């Protein structure tokens, strides 16, 4: 779990040039920083007294790692262990973010401005997972992978029959609000599973179609194989797809890094030029590139014709 981010107080001997030509008085800078810290403590204390600082938990029902990076935190929820109902992550700390109304934080102008402090409760932080993996509209849920449950509280004494407070965002008059509802955890898990299994069946359907097309079977990679293995374990499919355990042919792998090679530009992600003709036609490499030496006479005819076309196009400018 990411540590709580705080904004440090500048040392007393710091010298900050002002826009007006004179230096900012150090006592003013110290006072502004002290006010910032005091405001943070005031808001946290108020939330604590009102009993609003509560832990929040996310449950992951899928076989994949969940990760959300926002710049303020980077939480990772491990994949669901084999034979277990879910993996989980509980967040307990708040994150505070100063909001400045001045243009520049350390200018003399902004030091005279009032500033505010936004407090992100644990439940606010974990709502990012719902945004990325569940979605906020019916259209979102058709494309998201699902398998995620977020609720207020920790895992202590929690059972499938427990009632938990779950958040959702609602919009009123252009503003976003957090609304809580109570549901039985078992019902939430079933709802998460429904979205997750629909996504998995869609992945398998597409992979089965790609497997029958020699031009598209390279699209079947570890993600699709993991989904197939997971659906077998959950008894959602009776037999493994024929492509699940197929070893990649050498022709499908990059000669340099041995990774599965999938590219429309002829260049592997390791920068090796696997298909120099395709790379040249896509202007990824020049005609004198060393990998062009493997082209056949028939391929060189295409290259020479393309060189003539490009030369004429340049002269016509």
Image (cartoon, rainbow, N blue to C red):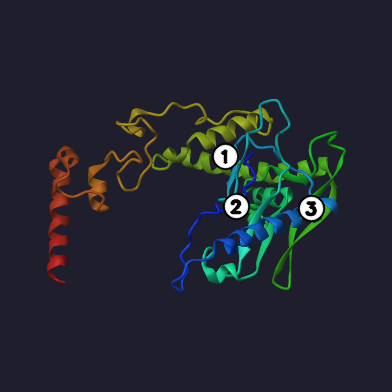
Q: Residue at x 34, y 31 (%)?
A: 257
In front of the other: label 3 or label 1?
3
**Number of numbered labels in the structure image:** 3
Which residue in the structure is indicated by mark 1?
A: 204
Q: Position of residue 143 (x, y in %)?
A: 60, 52
State the mark number for residue 45.
3
Spatial CA distance of label 3 from label 1 is 51 Å
Which residue in the structure is indicated by mark 2?
A: 7
Q: Secondary structure at mark 2?
A: loop
**Residue 103 visible to the viewer:** no
Q: Secondary structure at mark 1?
A: helix
Of mark 3 and mark 2, the one earlier in the sequence is 2
Q: Count neighbours of disc 1 (C-alpha within 10 A) and say few if under 14, some if 14 to 19, many if 20 or more.
A: some
Q: Count neighbours of disc 3 (C-alpha within 10 A) and say few if under 14, some if 14 to 19, many if 20 or more.
A: few
In front of the other: label 1 or label 2?
2
**Residue 174 visible to the viewer:** yes
């Amino acid at each position: 779990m990411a540590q709580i981010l705080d904004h440090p107080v500048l040392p007393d001997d710091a010298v900050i040039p002002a826009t007006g030509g004179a230096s900012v008085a150090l006592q003013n800078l110290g006072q502004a920083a002290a006010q910032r810290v005091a405001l943070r403590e005031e808001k946290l204390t108020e939330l604590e007294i009102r009993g609003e600082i509560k832990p929040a938990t996310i449950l992951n029902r899928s076989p994949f790692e969940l990760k959300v990076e926002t710049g303020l935190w980077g939480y990772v929820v491990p994949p669901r262990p084999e034979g277990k109902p879910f993996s989980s992550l509980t967040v307990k700390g708040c994150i505070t973010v100063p909001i400045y109304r001045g243009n520049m934080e350390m200018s003399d102008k902004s030091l005279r401005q009032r500033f505010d402090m936004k407090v992100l409760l644990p439940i606010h932080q974990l709502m990012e997972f719902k945004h990325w993996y569940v979605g906020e509209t019916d259209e979102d849920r058709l494309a998201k992978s699902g398998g995620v449950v977020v609720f207020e509280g920790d895992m202590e004494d929690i059972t499938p029959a427990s009632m938990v407070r779950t958040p959702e965002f609602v919009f009123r008059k252009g503003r976003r609000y957090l609304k809580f509802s109570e549901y039985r955890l078992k019902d939430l898990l079933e709802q998460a599973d429904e979205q997750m299994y629909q996504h998995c069946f869609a992945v398998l359907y597409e992979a089965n179609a790609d497997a029958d097309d020699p031009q598209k079977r390279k699209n079947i990679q570890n993600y699709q194989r993991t989904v197939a293995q997971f659906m077998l374990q959950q008894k959602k499919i009776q037999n493994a797809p024929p492509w699940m355990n197929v070893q990649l042919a050498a022709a499908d792998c990059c000669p340099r890094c041995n990774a599965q090679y999938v590219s429309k530009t002829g260049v592997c992600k390791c920068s090796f030029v696997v298909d120099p003709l395709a790379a040249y036609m896509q202007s990824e490499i020049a005609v004198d590139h060393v990998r062009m030496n493997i082209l056949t006479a028939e391929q060189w005819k295409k290259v020479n014709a393309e060189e003539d076309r490009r030369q004429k196009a340049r002269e016509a400018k």
